[in-house]
């Protein structure tokens, strides 16, 4: 191993710079060269002075606590569907993966450390089939929905930001006797809504894994007002679905985007609650606020543990895969076990059960008991 490259793909997340720094320092301390690729794989295709960055000690100084990524990121640099301008001036999705692999060889790059989510891991896996030498993935997504790992860096910061927002909304909701509906990120997994909702004292939490019934939500709000608490806090994941209905989109997909843009469920739900209950309701969309700013201490530590583990796996093994936190330790998980699915919230797991026990409504009518839902461990009599 003489030279490695790092790139960041997909949405940004707090802790990206901490990973970049830890990977670079670990590699530099082993005598390797470290190359940073701008905006996913774009820096390998665009001939600009700053398309590639030599990540020496000066380049990474002072970035540990910074949000965002010094390398930039994009969700439009999939080398298998890269936007290339055609003769008519229109951009066409084009397979440029061969050029990417050729550039790796030209630059003498022995391995890639890819920071990203399911899409980034999938792309890296495909590139290896085209000849990319080795890839170590580092799991990045505030949604915390990547398979193979118990947690992804960026999630803890997103939960902290969302919890603080709920704390602030409590006072204004109480002052105006309103229902505040807070829409948070979470396309297919409700981890942010679940954790922040419980931590922030929400009355209703709606997540993609538990289709909700409007009447259950209405009844929870009415119950709050009957008991003299003349306000309510509703947290809803952007991908939550009413029973029998699909997701709500604010923008359709184009040829370069893997996903259409979810949004609007918070505003719609606030309107529905006000019409059904007569309680004045307002909606707030936290959106990209959950991605930005300084990472909390937990994410800074997790990011560095994952970054250093990635370099150790490059130095001490010949395998590719994704670094994962499993049982408190770092493991290398094969990429084929990561891609093609998500890690969602367990609807009968301990955290959801905790929410139910403190009186939070999940928009459904749960049945059964705790013992019905949790596998029992047989104990041997002493």
Image (cartoon, rainbow, N blue to C red):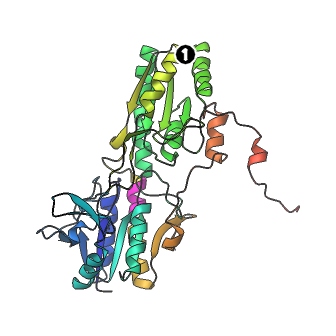
- According to the picture, the residue beneath numbered tag 1 turns out to be 277
Other residues around mark 1 within 10 Å, as few (<14) / some (14–19) / many (≥20): some
Instruction: State the image coordinates of residue 6 (x, y, percent, origin top left).
Output: 30, 71
Give the number of marks: 1
Instruction: Relative to 116, say whether 345 is above or below.
Output: above
Q: Is residue 32 left or right of residue 193?
A: left
In the image, farthest residue toward the front: 88
Left or right position of 38 against 148:
left
Q: Which residue is drawn at the image coordinates 39% and 52% (left, top)?
A: 259
Quarter-wise, where is residue 34 in the image?
A: bottom left
Kind of element beneath mark 1:
helix
- Residue 175 in the image: above or below residue 285: above
| Magenta residues, start to end | 298-305
Residue 234 colored magenta?
A: no
Question: Relative to 63, is 4 above or below?
Answer: below
Res. 72 visible in picture: yes
Q: Is residue 303 magenta?
A: yes
Image quadrant where one finds the C terminus: bottom right
In the image, residue 340 sits, relative to residue 244, either above or below, namely below
Question: Which residue is located at x 64 percent, y 33 percent?
Answer: 358
Q: Is residue 67 left or right of residue 365?
A: left
Q: Position of residue 321 (x, y in %)?
A: 46, 74
In depth, the one of 214 and 113 nearer the eye is 214
- Residue 56, given in percent of the width and then of the height, sits at 20, 73
Q: Quadrant of the N terminus?
A: bottom left
């Amino acid at each position: 191993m003489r030279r490695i490259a790092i790139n960041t793909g997909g949405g940004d997340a707090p802790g990206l710079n901490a990973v970049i720094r830890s990977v670079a320092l670990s590699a530099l301390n082993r005598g390797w060269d470290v190359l940073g690729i701008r905006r996913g794989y774009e820096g390998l295709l665009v001939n600009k002075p700053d398309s590639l960055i030599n990540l020496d000690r000066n380049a990474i100084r002072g970035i540990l606590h910074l949000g965002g990524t010094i390398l930039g990121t994009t969700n439009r640099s999939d080398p298998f569907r890269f936007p290339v301008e055609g003769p008519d001036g229109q951009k066409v999705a084009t397979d440029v993966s061969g050029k990417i692999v050729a550039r790796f060889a030209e630059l003498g790059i022995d391995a890639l450390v890819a920071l990203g989510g399911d899409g980034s891991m999938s792309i890296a896996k495909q590139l290896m089939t085209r000849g990319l030498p080795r890839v170590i993935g580092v799991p990045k997504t505030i949604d915390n929905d990547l398979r193979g790992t118990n947690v992804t860096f960026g999630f803890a910061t997103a939960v902290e930001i969302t919890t603080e927002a709920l704390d602030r909304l409590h006072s204004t909701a109480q002052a105006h006797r309103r229902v505040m509906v807070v829409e948070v990120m979470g396309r297919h997994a409700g981890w942010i809504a679940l954790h922040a909702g419980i931590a922030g004292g929400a009355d209703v939490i709606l997540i993609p894994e538990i289709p909700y019934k409007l009447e259950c939500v209405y009844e929870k709000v009415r119950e709050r007002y009957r008991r003299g608490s003349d306000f309510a806090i509703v947290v809803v994941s952007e991908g939550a679905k009413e029973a029998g209905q699909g997701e709500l989109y604010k923008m359709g997909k184009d040829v370069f985007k893997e996903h259409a843009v979810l949004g609007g469920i918070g505003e719609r739900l606030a309107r529905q609650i006000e019409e059904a209950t007569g309680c004045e309701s307002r909606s707030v969309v936290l959106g990209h606020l959950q991605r930005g700013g300084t990472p909390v201490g937990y994410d800074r530590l997790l990011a560095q543990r994952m970054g250093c583990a990635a370099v150790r796996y490059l130095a001490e093994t010949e395998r590719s895969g994704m670094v994962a936190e499993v049982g408190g330790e770092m493991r290398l998980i094969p990429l084929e076990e990561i891609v093609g699915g998500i890690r969602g919230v367990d609807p009968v797991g301990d955290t959801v059960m905790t929410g139910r026990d403190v009186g939070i409504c999940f928009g459904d009518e749960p049945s059964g008991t705790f013992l019905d839902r949790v596998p029992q461990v047989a104990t041997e009599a002493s």
